[in-house]
Amino acid sequence: MGVVRKTKHLEQVLRVFLQSSDALSAGMLLDVLDKEINKSTVYRMLDKLEDDGVIHSFLTMGQIRFYALCKGCSSGRHVDSHAHFQCTSCKRVSCFSEEIVLPTSERARITSAQVLLTGQCESCL
Ligand SMILES: [Zn+2]
Ligand SMILES: [Zn+2]
Ligand SMILES: [Zn+2]
């Protein structure tokens, strides 16, 4: 696979994220991307984008990993400490922009939180 093609695939993945207001799983990406892009390619691209501070990932119900675009993160340093929301009816997942205030503790240095809020989304209410 040539470099040009690889870049094209990466652009395609980014475009899907930019066009979606929701967070996406690797499986959802596979459904909308070119058929020539296989699962391991998708995972490799997602890993790279996460390393580059472009997207962040988190676990949802059923331990399924979802990915969403970052705001203000840079290579090797993620500053996303917000909660994520999953609708229990339609299973859609999105970022919640409200910052989470990290607790301080003498027993540990807390640097991030994985918070998954669940309930009904606007369209399922
Ligand atoms: Zn980030
Ligand atoms: Zn819903
Ligand atoms: Zn997020």
Image (cartoon, grey):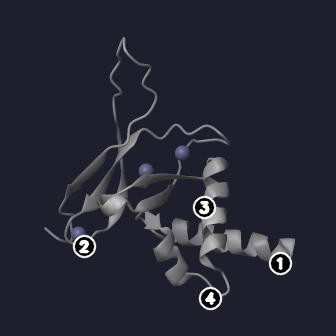
For the residue labelled by badge 2, is the local secondary structure a helix, a strand or a loop? loop
Residue drawn at the location 62% of the way across and 88% of the way down = 35
Q: CA distance from mark 4 to mark 2?
A: 26 Å
Residues at circles 3 and 4 in contact by the CB criterion of under 8 Å: no
Q: Earlier in the sequence, mark 3 or mark 4?
A: 4
The image shows residue 32 at horizontal and vertical percentages of 53, 82
Q: Is mark 1 within 8 Å of ligand 1?
A: no
The dot on residue 90 is 2
Residue drawn at the location 20% of the way across and 65% of the way down = 88
Residues at circles 1 and 4 in contact by the CB criterion of under 8 Å: no
Q: Earlier in the sequence, mark 3 or mark 1?
A: 1
Q: Is mark 4 within 8 Å of ligand 3?
A: no
Q: Earlier in the sequence, mark 4 or mark 2?
A: 4
Q: Badge 3: few (under 14), some or many (20 or more) residues near its Cα, within 10 Å?
A: many
Looking at the image, is 90 positioned above or below residue 74? below
In this rendering, which labeled residue sits more in front, label 2 or label 1? 1
Residue drawn at the location 19% of the way across and 71% of the way down = 89
Relative to 44, 114 lies left or right: left
Residues at circles 4 and 2 in contact by the CB criterion of under 8 Å: no
The residue tagged 4 is 35
Going by the numbered disc 2, the residue's amino acid type is Cys
Number of on-image labels: 4
The dot on residue 1 is 1
Going by the numbered disc 3, the residue's amino acid type is Leu
The residue tagged 3 is 46
Q: Badge 4: few (under 14), some or many (20 or more) residues near its Cα, within 10 Å?
A: few
For the residue labelled by badge 1, is the local secondary structure a helix, a strand or a loop? loop
Q: Earlier in the sequence, mark 1 or mark 4?
A: 1
For the residue labelled by badge 3, is the local secondary structure a helix, a strand or a loop? helix
Q: CA distance from mark 3 to mark 4?
A: 17 Å
Going by the numbered disc 4, the residue's amino acid type is Lys
Q: CA distance from mark 2 to mark 3?
A: 24 Å
